[in-house]
Image (spheres, rainbow, N blue to C red):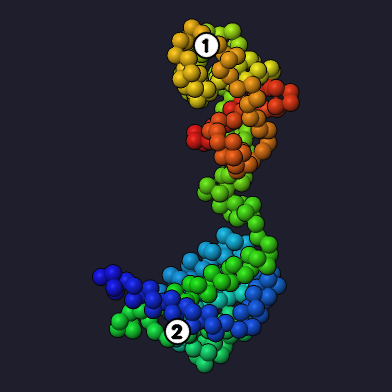
Amino acid sequence: MKDIAKRVFDTEIASLQFVADSIDDEFTRVVEAILKNAGKLIVIGIGKSGIIGKKIAATFASTGTPSFFLHPGEAFHGDLGMVGTDDMVILISYSGETDEVLKLIPFLEWNKNTIIAITGNPKSTVAKNSHYHLNICIKQEACPLALAPTSSTTAALVMGDALAVALMESRQFQHEDFARFHPGGSLGRKLLIRVKDLMRTDKLPFITVDASFTELLLKMSEGRLGMVIVGDANNVNGIVTDGDLRRALFKNPDTAQLTIEGMMTKTPVFIHEDEFINQAEQLMIEKKITTVLVGSSDDRFVSGVYQIYNS
C-alpha cells in the first residue's frame, strides 16, 4: 500500500511542477487586477471544484482579501443578488465546460463583473468568456481510472494559495493583520490580548523577608504559582520560586538555617501590563521562566503575575 501512496504523491507533485512551469505574466495581471478591485472576490465552483473553491475563498478572507464562496446552483436560483457590480468573480472548472458555471456567465457579463477563470483548458467556454485565465492543465490525474479529480483539484488549490500569498505580500500583510481575522485562535490571542487581560491580580502570595521556612511553604502552596513575592505590592524585594527552594535544599537540607533573603532572586523579571501576550511569552522563553511579575522593575511595584501555562 505504501507504494500506492508514493505513486500518488509522485504523480501529484509532477502535476504541480507542470502547472508551475506554465505560469506566465497572466498571473501577475490577475494579482494586479484583484489589488485594484474595490469589491469582494467571489469564488464559484461545483462538485470537487466547489470544495476547493470554499477553501480558496476562506484563505482569501483570512489574509486580507474580502471573499466568499458562492454555489452556482444557489446562485442561479436567487443568490446572484449577493454579487455586486464592483465584485470580481473566480470561476473554477477544470474542463471549463461545467454547465452550472456556464449558466452564470450571461449574468456576470450583464452585471459588468470581472471574471477570472481557473481551468485546465484555455480554449474552453469558461476561459474564452473570462477577462483573465489561469491555466492549471495537468499531465495526469493520480486516480488510476483518470476519473476522480485528484491532481487537478490539487493544482486548483495550490493556484488559489499562490494568489493568496501573492496578494498578502503585495499588501504587506503582517502577523497583526492575520490575528485580527483570527481573534479566537492562538495567534490572535497572542497578538491582540495584553498581559493585563490575563494576569492574576487576586491573592498574590506575598511574604516578608523575615518569614519562616514553614510560612514560605504555606504561602507558596496557597498561591499556586510556584513562587512567592518577597515584600509587598509597592516594594518588591525579590521572589522565591520552587526552583530556588529546591536548589537551596540541595545545598543545605537543614531548613532551620535557610533564610528568605538567602534563597530569593533579588532581580526578578518584570513586564509592563500593556505589553502583548506574545511579547511576554517570548521574554519568558528567553529567560527560561514560566512566571513573570507584572509591574515595574525600576519602581519595584507589582500589579499582577502572568504565568505562561495557565493562560
Quadrant of the image occupied by residue 274: top right
Residue ID for mark 1: 258
Q: Secondary structure at mark 2?
A: loop
Residue ID for mark 2: 138
Seen as rendered, the residue at the extreme front is 251
At which x and y percent is residue 144?
A: 30, 82
Question: Would you call the spot at circle 1 few (<14 residues within 10 Å), some (14-19), or many (20 or more)?
Answer: some
Give yes or no for contact between labels 2 and 1 (Cβ–Cβ under 8 Å). no
Q: Residue at x 32, y 71 (%)?
A: 5
Seen as rendered, the residue at the extreme bottom is 123
Q: Secondary structure at mark 1?
A: loop
- Mark 2–mark 1 Cα distance, whole angstroms, equals 74 Å
Residue 206 appears anywhere in the view:
no
Q: Residue at x 68, y 75 (%)?
A: 32
- Residue 293 image label: none
At which x and y percent is residue 6?
A: 34, 72
At which x and y percent is residue 38?
A: 69, 69
Looking at numbered disc 1 in the image, what kind of residue is underneath it? Leu
Residue 205 appears anywhere in the view:
yes
Front residue of 59/290: it is 290
Q: Residue at x 52, y 47 (%)?
A: 186
Question: Would you call the spot at circle 2 few (<14 residues within 10 Å), some (14-19), or many (20 or more)?
Answer: many
Earlier residue among tags 2 and 1: 2
At which x and y percent is residue 237?
A: 65, 17
